Amino acid sequence: MNINLTLFVQMIAFAVFAAFCMKYVWPPIMKALEERTAKIAEGLAAAERGKQEQELGEQRAVEVMKEAKSSAADIVSQAQKRYNEIVDEAKRDAQAEADRIRHAAQAEIEQEANRAREELRERMAQLAIAAAEKILQKEVDANAHRDIVDAFAQRI
Amino acid sequence: MAAELTAQQYIQHHLTNLTLGLHPEHGLSFAHNAEEAAEMGFWALHVDSLLWSFGLGYLAYRFMLGVAQKATAGVPNPAQNFFEAIVDFVNENVRGSFTAKNDLVAPLAMTVFVWVFLMNLMDLVPVDLIPHAFAQLMGLFGADPHHVYMRVVPTTDPNITFGMSIGVFLLVLYYSFKVKGVGGFAAELTMQPFGKFGMPANLVLEGISLFSKPLSLSLRLFGNMYAGEMIFILIALMYGHNLMLDISGGVLQLAWAIFHILIITLQAFIFMVLTIVYLDMAHQHH
Protein backbone atom coordinates (compact mmCIF):
# COMPACT_ATOMS: atom_id res chain seq x y z
CA MET A 1 0.00 0.00 0.00
CA ASN A 2 2.66 2.44 -1.07
CA ILE A 3 2.01 5.69 -2.85
CA ASN A 4 4.29 5.66 -5.86
CA LEU A 5 4.57 6.32 -9.55
CA THR A 6 1.39 4.33 -10.12
CA LEU A 7 -0.60 7.38 -9.01
CA PHE A 8 0.77 9.58 -11.76
CA VAL A 9 0.48 6.92 -14.43
CA GLN A 10 -3.17 6.44 -13.44
CA MET A 11 -3.68 10.20 -13.51
CA ILE A 12 -2.32 10.42 -17.04
CA ALA A 13 -4.40 7.43 -18.10
CA PHE A 14 -7.47 9.07 -16.59
CA ALA A 15 -6.80 12.27 -18.53
CA VAL A 16 -6.29 10.33 -21.76
CA PHE A 17 -9.39 8.18 -21.26
CA ALA A 18 -11.54 11.21 -20.45
CA ALA A 19 -10.15 13.16 -23.39
CA PHE A 20 -10.81 10.29 -25.82
CA CYS A 21 -14.34 9.85 -24.50
CA MET A 22 -14.95 13.56 -24.85
CA LYS A 23 -13.58 13.68 -28.36
CA TYR A 24 -14.71 10.42 -29.96
CA VAL A 25 -17.49 8.87 -27.89
CA TRP A 26 -19.61 11.69 -26.55
CA PRO A 27 -20.32 13.83 -29.64
CA PRO A 28 -21.71 11.09 -31.94
CA ILE A 29 -23.92 9.58 -29.27
CA MET A 30 -25.25 13.00 -28.24
CA LYS A 31 -25.85 13.82 -31.89
CA ALA A 32 -27.82 10.61 -32.32
CA LEU A 33 -29.84 11.33 -29.19
CA GLU A 34 -30.60 14.89 -30.24
CA GLU A 35 -31.51 13.79 -33.74
CA ARG A 36 -33.88 11.20 -32.35
CA THR A 37 -35.44 13.79 -30.06
CA ALA A 38 -35.96 16.09 -33.03
CA LYS A 39 -37.35 13.20 -35.06
CA ILE A 40 -39.82 12.24 -32.37
CA ALA A 41 -40.91 15.85 -31.89
CA GLU A 42 -41.38 16.14 -35.63
CA GLY A 43 -43.39 12.93 -35.71
CA LEU A 44 -45.62 14.10 -32.89
CA ALA A 45 -46.17 17.45 -34.61
CA ALA A 46 -46.99 15.65 -37.86
CA ALA A 47 -49.47 13.44 -36.04
CA GLU A 48 -51.07 16.51 -34.51
CA ARG A 49 -51.26 18.15 -37.93
CA GLY A 50 -52.75 15.00 -39.41
CA LYS A 51 -55.37 14.91 -36.68
CA GLN A 52 -56.33 18.51 -37.35
CA GLU A 53 -56.51 17.85 -41.06
CA GLN A 54 -58.68 14.84 -40.42
CA GLU A 55 -61.06 16.94 -38.32
CA LEU A 56 -61.18 19.55 -41.06
CA GLY A 57 -61.85 16.85 -43.62
CA GLU A 58 -64.62 15.42 -41.47
CA GLN A 59 -66.20 18.86 -41.19
CA ARG A 60 -65.96 19.31 -44.93
CA ALA A 61 -67.47 15.90 -45.51
CA VAL A 62 -70.42 16.81 -43.28
CA GLU A 63 -70.89 20.03 -45.20
CA VAL A 64 -70.73 18.27 -48.54
CA MET A 65 -73.23 15.70 -47.33
CA LYS A 66 -75.60 18.42 -46.14
CA GLU A 67 -75.30 20.16 -49.49
CA ALA A 68 -75.92 16.93 -51.33
CA LYS A 69 -78.97 16.20 -49.20
CA SER A 70 -80.49 19.62 -49.80
CA SER A 71 -79.82 19.45 -53.52
CA ALA A 72 -81.32 15.96 -53.63
CA ALA A 73 -84.43 17.32 -51.88
CA ASP A 74 -84.53 20.13 -54.44
CA ILE A 75 -84.32 17.69 -57.27
CA VAL A 76 -87.04 15.51 -55.79
CA SER A 77 -89.38 18.45 -55.30
CA GLN A 78 -88.67 19.69 -58.81
CA ALA A 79 -89.40 16.26 -60.17
CA GLN A 80 -92.60 16.16 -58.15
CA LYS A 81 -93.63 19.49 -59.64
CA ARG A 82 -92.78 18.41 -63.13
CA TYR A 83 -94.68 15.17 -62.57
CA ASN A 84 -97.74 17.07 -61.45
CA GLU A 85 -97.45 19.29 -64.46
CA ILE A 86 -97.20 16.35 -66.79
CA VAL A 87 -100.15 14.64 -65.18
CA ASP A 88 -102.19 17.81 -65.39
CA GLU A 89 -101.24 18.29 -69.00
CA ALA A 90 -102.14 14.73 -69.81
CA LYS A 91 -105.45 15.14 -68.05
CA ARG A 92 -106.18 18.30 -70.01
CA ASP A 93 -105.19 16.67 -73.27
CA ALA A 94 -107.32 13.65 -72.54
CA GLN A 95 -110.25 15.86 -71.61
CA ALA A 96 -109.85 17.83 -74.82
CA GLU A 97 -109.60 14.68 -76.87
CA ALA A 98 -112.62 13.22 -75.19
CA ASP A 99 -114.57 16.43 -75.82
CA ARG A 100 -113.50 16.46 -79.43
CA ILE A 101 -114.51 12.86 -79.89
CA ARG A 102 -117.81 13.48 -78.19
CA HIS A 103 -118.51 16.52 -80.35
CA ALA A 104 -117.65 14.59 -83.48
CA ALA A 105 -119.90 11.75 -82.39
CA GLN A 106 -122.72 14.14 -81.58
CA ALA A 107 -122.33 15.86 -84.93
CA GLU A 108 -122.45 12.56 -86.70
CA ILE A 109 -125.48 11.47 -84.74
CA GLU A 110 -127.20 14.71 -85.62
CA GLN A 111 -126.28 14.29 -89.24
CA GLU A 112 -127.56 10.73 -89.20
CA ALA A 113 -130.72 11.86 -87.52
CA ASN A 114 -131.22 14.63 -90.04
CA ARG A 115 -130.64 12.29 -92.85
CA ALA A 116 -133.04 9.78 -91.39
CA ARG A 117 -135.55 12.54 -90.83
CA GLU A 118 -135.14 13.68 -94.44
CA GLU A 119 -135.60 10.18 -95.68
CA LEU A 120 -138.56 9.69 -93.46
CA ARG A 121 -140.01 12.93 -94.73
CA GLU A 122 -139.52 11.86 -98.28
CA ARG A 123 -141.01 8.49 -97.54
CA MET A 124 -143.95 10.17 -95.87
CA ALA A 125 -144.36 12.42 -98.88
CA GLN A 126 -144.35 9.44 -101.14
CA LEU A 127 -146.76 7.69 -98.86
CA ALA A 128 -148.91 10.80 -98.80
CA ILE A 129 -148.83 10.99 -102.52
CA ALA A 130 -149.64 7.34 -102.80
CA ALA A 131 -152.46 7.84 -100.36
CA ALA A 132 -153.70 10.85 -102.20
CA GLU A 133 -153.52 8.86 -105.48
CA LYS A 134 -155.54 6.16 -103.93
CA ILE A 135 -157.96 8.75 -102.61
CA LEU A 136 -158.23 10.63 -105.82
CA GLN A 137 -158.16 7.45 -107.90
CA LYS A 138 -156.10 9.17 -110.27
CA GLU A 139 -152.58 9.57 -111.17
CA VAL A 140 -151.22 12.67 -109.68
CA ASP A 141 -148.43 14.07 -111.57
CA ALA A 142 -145.71 14.02 -109.06
CA ASN A 143 -143.83 16.60 -110.89
CA ALA A 144 -146.81 18.86 -111.24
CA HIS A 145 -147.52 18.78 -107.57
CA ARG A 146 -144.01 18.79 -106.33
CA ASP A 147 -144.63 22.06 -104.55
CA ILE A 148 -147.49 20.69 -102.61
CA VAL A 149 -145.67 17.46 -101.74
CA ASP A 150 -142.61 19.35 -100.64
CA ALA A 151 -144.66 21.71 -98.56
CA PHE A 152 -146.29 18.79 -97.01
CA ALA A 153 -143.10 16.98 -96.39
CA GLN A 154 -141.78 20.16 -94.89
CA ARG A 155 -144.48 20.21 -92.33
CA ILE A 156 -143.86 16.75 -91.07
CA MET B 1 -3.66 -21.68 -0.55
CA ALA B 2 -4.98 -21.24 2.92
CA ALA B 3 -3.72 -24.69 3.78
CA GLU B 4 -0.13 -23.80 2.96
CA LEU B 5 -0.10 -20.36 4.53
CA THR B 6 -1.12 -18.94 7.86
CA ALA B 7 -4.19 -16.72 7.75
CA GLN B 8 -2.02 -13.66 8.22
CA GLN B 9 0.27 -14.64 5.38
CA TYR B 10 -2.71 -15.37 3.19
CA ILE B 11 -4.22 -11.93 3.80
CA GLN B 12 -0.84 -10.28 3.41
CA HIS B 13 -0.38 -12.05 0.09
CA HIS B 14 -3.72 -10.79 -1.15
CA LEU B 15 -2.97 -7.23 -0.14
CA THR B 16 0.40 -7.00 -1.86
CA ASN B 17 0.59 -5.50 -5.32
CA LEU B 18 2.63 -6.86 -8.16
CA THR B 19 5.27 -4.15 -7.93
CA LEU B 20 7.85 -3.36 -10.58
CA GLY B 21 10.47 -0.89 -9.52
CA LEU B 22 14.04 0.07 -8.79
CA HIS B 23 15.12 -1.85 -5.70
CA PRO B 24 18.22 -0.40 -3.98
CA GLU B 25 19.87 -3.83 -4.00
CA HIS B 26 18.26 -5.83 -6.84
CA GLY B 27 17.88 -3.02 -9.37
CA LEU B 28 14.89 -3.00 -11.71
CA SER B 29 12.82 -6.01 -10.71
CA PHE B 30 9.49 -7.30 -9.42
CA ALA B 31 9.25 -7.12 -5.65
CA HIS B 32 9.28 -10.55 -4.02
CA ASN B 33 7.42 -9.41 -0.93
CA ALA B 34 5.80 -6.41 0.69
CA GLU B 35 9.06 -5.27 2.33
CA GLU B 36 10.90 -5.17 -0.95
CA ALA B 37 8.03 -3.24 -2.50
CA ALA B 38 8.21 -0.71 0.31
CA GLU B 39 11.97 -0.38 -0.14
CA MET B 40 11.48 0.56 -3.75
CA GLY B 41 10.01 3.88 -2.62
CA PHE B 42 8.42 6.19 -5.11
CA TRP B 43 9.94 4.83 -8.31
CA ALA B 44 7.79 1.76 -8.55
CA LEU B 45 4.71 0.75 -10.49
CA HIS B 46 1.83 -1.42 -9.35
CA VAL B 47 1.70 -3.41 -12.55
CA ASP B 48 -1.43 -5.34 -11.59
CA SER B 49 -3.50 -2.27 -10.68
CA LEU B 50 -2.41 -0.45 -13.80
CA LEU B 51 -2.97 -3.42 -16.11
CA TRP B 52 -6.48 -4.06 -14.80
CA SER B 53 -7.34 -0.40 -14.81
CA PHE B 54 -6.01 0.13 -18.34
CA GLY B 55 -7.53 -3.11 -19.58
CA LEU B 56 -10.98 -2.32 -18.21
CA GLY B 57 -10.72 1.26 -19.40
CA TYR B 58 -9.68 0.14 -22.86
CA LEU B 59 -12.49 -2.43 -22.99
CA ALA B 60 -15.05 0.18 -21.99
CA TYR B 61 -13.58 2.64 -24.47
CA ARG B 62 -13.70 0.15 -27.33
CA PHE B 63 -17.31 -0.71 -26.52
CA MET B 64 -18.38 2.91 -26.23
CA LEU B 65 -16.48 3.92 -29.36
CA GLY B 66 -17.99 1.05 -31.33
CA VAL B 67 -21.47 2.04 -30.26
CA ALA B 68 -20.85 5.74 -30.85
CA GLN B 69 -19.52 5.22 -34.35
CA LYS B 70 -22.52 3.16 -35.33
CA ALA B 71 -24.94 5.36 -33.40
CA THR B 72 -28.11 6.00 -35.29
CA ALA B 73 -30.97 8.38 -34.67
CA GLY B 74 -33.33 5.66 -35.85
CA VAL B 75 -34.16 2.46 -33.99
CA PRO B 76 -31.15 1.70 -31.76
CA ASN B 77 -29.71 -1.82 -31.46
CA PRO B 78 -29.43 -3.38 -27.97
CA ALA B 79 -25.83 -2.19 -27.44
CA GLN B 80 -26.75 1.37 -28.32
CA ASN B 81 -29.84 1.13 -26.16
CA PHE B 82 -27.72 0.03 -23.23
CA PHE B 83 -25.14 2.74 -23.76
CA GLU B 84 -27.81 5.38 -24.26
CA ALA B 85 -29.31 4.44 -20.91
CA ILE B 86 -25.91 5.14 -19.27
CA VAL B 87 -25.47 8.38 -21.21
CA ASP B 88 -28.96 9.52 -20.26
CA PHE B 89 -28.34 8.66 -16.62
CA VAL B 90 -25.07 10.62 -16.57
CA ASN B 91 -26.59 13.50 -18.51
CA GLU B 92 -29.48 13.77 -16.11
CA ASN B 93 -27.10 13.99 -13.17
CA VAL B 94 -25.00 16.61 -14.92
CA ARG B 95 -28.10 18.66 -15.74
CA GLY B 96 -29.28 18.37 -12.15
CA SER B 97 -26.01 19.33 -10.44
CA PHE B 98 -24.01 21.35 -12.94
CA THR B 99 -25.38 24.80 -13.65
CA ALA B 100 -22.62 26.34 -15.78
CA LYS B 101 -21.90 25.53 -19.40
CA ASN B 102 -18.97 23.19 -19.97
CA ASP B 103 -18.79 20.43 -22.57
CA LEU B 104 -16.09 18.61 -20.62
CA VAL B 105 -18.14 17.75 -17.57
CA ALA B 106 -20.66 15.25 -19.00
CA PRO B 107 -18.12 13.03 -20.84
CA LEU B 108 -15.78 13.27 -17.85
CA ALA B 109 -18.58 12.19 -15.51
CA MET B 110 -19.43 9.29 -17.83
CA THR B 111 -15.78 8.22 -17.98
CA VAL B 112 -15.57 8.33 -14.19
CA PHE B 113 -18.79 6.38 -13.72
CA VAL B 114 -18.09 3.66 -16.28
CA TRP B 115 -14.46 3.22 -15.34
CA VAL B 116 -14.89 3.21 -11.59
CA PHE B 117 -17.86 0.88 -11.90
CA LEU B 118 -15.88 -1.62 -13.98
CA MET B 119 -12.89 -1.48 -11.66
CA ASN B 120 -15.16 -2.00 -8.66
CA LEU B 121 -16.89 -4.84 -10.47
CA MET B 122 -13.66 -6.86 -10.38
CA ASP B 123 -14.39 -7.27 -6.67
CA LEU B 124 -17.12 -9.77 -7.56
CA VAL B 125 -14.63 -12.15 -9.17
CA PRO B 126 -13.79 -14.79 -6.54
CA VAL B 127 -10.74 -13.49 -4.67
CA ASP B 128 -8.44 -16.45 -5.34
CA LEU B 129 -9.39 -17.17 -8.94
CA ILE B 130 -7.24 -14.76 -10.91
CA PRO B 131 -4.32 -14.43 -8.43
CA HIS B 132 -4.00 -18.21 -8.16
CA ALA B 133 -4.25 -18.75 -11.92
CA PHE B 134 -1.70 -15.99 -12.48
CA ALA B 135 0.67 -17.43 -9.89
CA GLN B 136 0.46 -20.87 -11.51
CA LEU B 137 1.05 -19.32 -14.93
CA MET B 138 4.10 -17.42 -13.69
CA GLY B 139 5.26 -20.63 -12.02
CA LEU B 140 5.51 -22.13 -15.50
CA PHE B 141 8.03 -19.42 -16.34
CA GLY B 142 10.16 -20.31 -13.36
CA ALA B 143 8.89 -17.79 -10.80
CA ASP B 144 8.09 -18.88 -7.27
CA PRO B 145 4.24 -18.93 -7.13
CA HIS B 146 4.30 -17.81 -3.49
CA HIS B 147 5.97 -14.56 -4.40
CA VAL B 148 3.83 -13.72 -7.41
CA TYR B 149 1.28 -11.12 -6.43
CA MET B 150 -1.86 -10.05 -8.23
CA ARG B 151 -4.56 -7.69 -7.04
CA VAL B 152 -7.43 -7.55 -9.49
CA VAL B 153 -9.47 -4.68 -8.02
CA PRO B 154 -7.67 -1.47 -8.99
CA THR B 155 -9.87 0.69 -6.77
CA THR B 156 -8.50 -1.06 -3.66
CA ASP B 157 -5.18 0.54 -4.55
CA PRO B 158 -5.01 4.11 -3.20
CA ASN B 159 -2.69 5.02 -6.06
CA ILE B 160 -5.53 4.47 -8.50
CA THR B 161 -8.19 6.32 -6.52
CA PHE B 162 -5.83 9.19 -5.72
CA GLY B 163 -4.73 9.31 -9.34
CA MET B 164 -8.32 9.89 -10.37
CA SER B 165 -9.29 12.25 -7.57
CA ILE B 166 -6.16 14.38 -8.04
CA GLY B 167 -6.99 14.50 -11.75
CA VAL B 168 -10.42 15.84 -10.82
CA PHE B 169 -8.82 18.20 -8.29
CA LEU B 170 -6.50 19.66 -10.94
CA LEU B 171 -9.54 20.32 -13.12
CA VAL B 172 -11.26 21.99 -10.17
CA LEU B 173 -8.21 24.25 -9.65
CA TYR B 174 -7.97 24.98 -13.37
CA TYR B 175 -11.60 26.00 -13.69
CA SER B 176 -11.51 27.94 -10.41
CA PHE B 177 -8.69 30.05 -11.79
CA LYS B 178 -10.25 30.28 -15.23
CA VAL B 179 -13.77 31.22 -14.16
CA LYS B 180 -13.11 33.32 -11.06
CA GLY B 181 -9.69 34.65 -12.02
CA VAL B 182 -6.69 34.52 -9.70
CA GLY B 183 -8.07 37.36 -7.59
CA GLY B 184 -11.54 35.90 -7.43
CA PHE B 185 -10.26 32.49 -6.38
CA ALA B 186 -7.94 34.05 -3.80
CA ALA B 187 -10.83 36.12 -2.48
CA GLU B 188 -12.98 33.02 -2.21
CA LEU B 189 -10.26 31.33 -0.16
CA THR B 190 -9.54 34.28 2.14
CA MET B 191 -12.58 36.59 2.37
CA GLN B 192 -15.18 34.22 3.72
CA PRO B 193 -16.81 33.10 5.93
CA PHE B 194 -15.48 35.66 8.48
CA GLY B 195 -14.88 38.71 6.29
CA LYS B 196 -11.52 40.33 5.58
CA PHE B 197 -10.47 40.66 9.24
CA GLY B 198 -10.58 36.95 9.79
CA MET B 199 -8.31 36.26 6.84
CA PRO B 200 -6.01 33.62 8.41
CA ALA B 201 -8.94 31.71 9.83
CA ASN B 202 -10.72 31.94 6.48
CA LEU B 203 -7.67 30.61 4.66
CA VAL B 204 -7.35 27.68 7.04
CA LEU B 205 -11.03 26.80 6.79
CA GLU B 206 -11.30 27.21 3.04
CA GLY B 207 -7.95 25.53 2.48
CA ILE B 208 -9.08 22.50 4.43
CA SER B 209 -12.36 22.41 2.59
CA LEU B 210 -10.53 22.68 -0.74
CA PHE B 211 -7.99 19.95 -0.04
CA SER B 212 -10.50 17.68 1.61
CA LYS B 213 -12.20 17.36 -1.78
CA PRO B 214 -9.68 15.06 -3.51
CA LEU B 215 -8.85 13.39 -0.21
CA SER B 216 -12.42 12.46 0.62
CA LEU B 217 -13.19 11.57 -2.99
CA SER B 218 -10.40 9.02 -3.23
CA LEU B 219 -10.42 7.75 0.34
CA ARG B 220 -14.17 7.09 0.26
CA LEU B 221 -13.85 4.91 -2.81
CA PHE B 222 -10.65 3.27 -1.63
CA GLY B 223 -12.01 2.60 1.87
CA ASN B 224 -15.24 1.07 0.66
CA MET B 225 -13.59 -1.17 -1.89
CA TYR B 226 -10.72 -2.12 0.39
CA ALA B 227 -13.10 -3.10 3.19
CA GLY B 228 -15.25 -5.03 0.76
CA GLU B 229 -12.29 -6.93 -0.59
CA MET B 230 -11.04 -7.60 2.92
CA ILE B 231 -14.34 -9.22 3.82
CA PHE B 232 -14.18 -11.40 0.71
CA ILE B 233 -10.67 -12.45 1.76
CA LEU B 234 -11.83 -13.23 5.29
CA ILE B 235 -14.72 -15.28 3.95
CA ALA B 236 -12.29 -17.10 1.66
CA LEU B 237 -10.30 -18.07 4.78
CA MET B 238 -13.23 -20.24 5.86
CA TYR B 239 -12.83 -22.65 2.96
CA GLY B 240 -10.93 -25.88 3.15
CA HIS B 241 -11.36 -26.75 6.84
CA ASN B 242 -14.57 -28.76 7.06
CA LEU B 243 -17.87 -29.09 5.25
CA MET B 244 -19.82 -26.92 7.71
CA LEU B 245 -17.43 -24.00 7.26
CA ASP B 246 -17.34 -24.50 3.50
CA ILE B 247 -21.11 -24.25 3.25
CA SER B 248 -21.46 -21.26 5.55
CA GLY B 249 -18.56 -19.63 3.73
CA GLY B 250 -20.35 -20.14 0.42
CA VAL B 251 -23.58 -18.68 1.78
CA LEU B 252 -21.72 -15.71 3.28
CA GLN B 253 -19.80 -15.07 0.10
CA LEU B 254 -22.99 -15.12 -1.97
CA ALA B 255 -24.76 -12.78 0.46
CA TRP B 256 -21.83 -10.37 0.60
CA ALA B 257 -21.44 -10.42 -3.19
CA ILE B 258 -25.10 -9.55 -3.67
CA PHE B 259 -24.83 -6.76 -1.12
CA HIS B 260 -21.59 -5.65 -2.71
CA ILE B 261 -23.31 -5.05 -6.05
CA LEU B 262 -25.02 -2.14 -4.34
CA ILE B 263 -21.75 -0.76 -2.94
CA ILE B 264 -19.98 -1.11 -6.28
CA THR B 265 -22.66 0.85 -8.10
CA LEU B 266 -23.13 3.33 -5.30
CA GLN B 267 -19.43 4.17 -5.03
CA ALA B 268 -19.13 4.66 -8.77
CA PHE B 269 -22.21 6.88 -8.65
CA ILE B 270 -20.90 8.91 -5.69
CA PHE B 271 -17.54 9.43 -7.35
CA MET B 272 -19.33 10.68 -10.47
CA VAL B 273 -21.75 12.97 -8.64
CA LEU B 274 -19.01 14.49 -6.48
CA THR B 275 -16.89 15.09 -9.57
CA ILE B 276 -19.81 16.99 -11.09
CA VAL B 277 -20.52 18.90 -7.88
CA TYR B 278 -16.88 19.89 -7.30
CA LEU B 279 -16.60 21.12 -10.88
CA ASP B 280 -19.86 23.00 -10.47
CA MET B 281 -18.49 24.70 -7.34
CA ALA B 282 -15.39 25.67 -9.33
CA HIS B 283 -17.67 27.40 -11.86
CA GLN B 284 -19.64 29.35 -9.25
CA HIS B 285 -19.18 33.08 -8.94
CA HIS B 286 -19.55 34.71 -5.56
Image: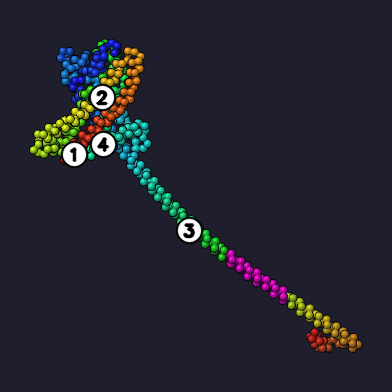
N-terminal of the pair, mark 4 or mark 2, is 4
Residue at numbered disc 4: B94
Circle 4 SS class: helix
What's the chain of the residue with tag 3?
A: A
Would you say B9 lies left or right of B190 here? right
Task: For marks 1 and 3, give the CA distance.
Answer: 69 Å
Q: Which residue is mark 2?
A: B225
Could you tell me residue B24's position as x and y percent?
Answer: 15, 14
> Which residue type carries mark 2?
Met
Foreground mark, 4 or 2, reads 2
Q: Magenta segment range? A: A82-107
In 3D space, how far apart are the residues under numbered discs 2 and 3 (Cα atoms)?
A: 81 Å
Q: Residue furthest right?
A: A137
Q: Which residue is mark 3?
A: A67
As drawn, B225 above or below A127: above
Q: At 26% from the left edge and 14% from the top edge, which residue is drawn?
A: B7
Are dots 4 and 1 on a single chain? yes
In the picture shown, does residue B144 fall above or below B105? Answer: above
Residue at (46, 55) in percent of width and height:
A62
Gap in Å between the C-alphas at discs 4 and 1? 15 Å
User: Viewed as shown, does residue A52 lie left or right of B281?
Assistant: right
Which disc, if any, is residue B156?
A: none
* Residue B107 placement (x, y as % from top left): 26, 33
- Marked residue nearer the N-terminal end (1 or 2): 2
For image coordinates 16% across by 40% down, the residue present is B286
Element under label 3? helix
In magenta segment, residue A93: yes
Q: Which of the two discs, 1 and 3, sits closer to the camera?
A: 1
Kindly state the secondary structure of the residue where label 2 is placed: helix
Which residue was labeled with disc 1?
A: B284
Instruction: Tell me what residue is drawn at x 33 percent, y 42 percent.
Output: A38
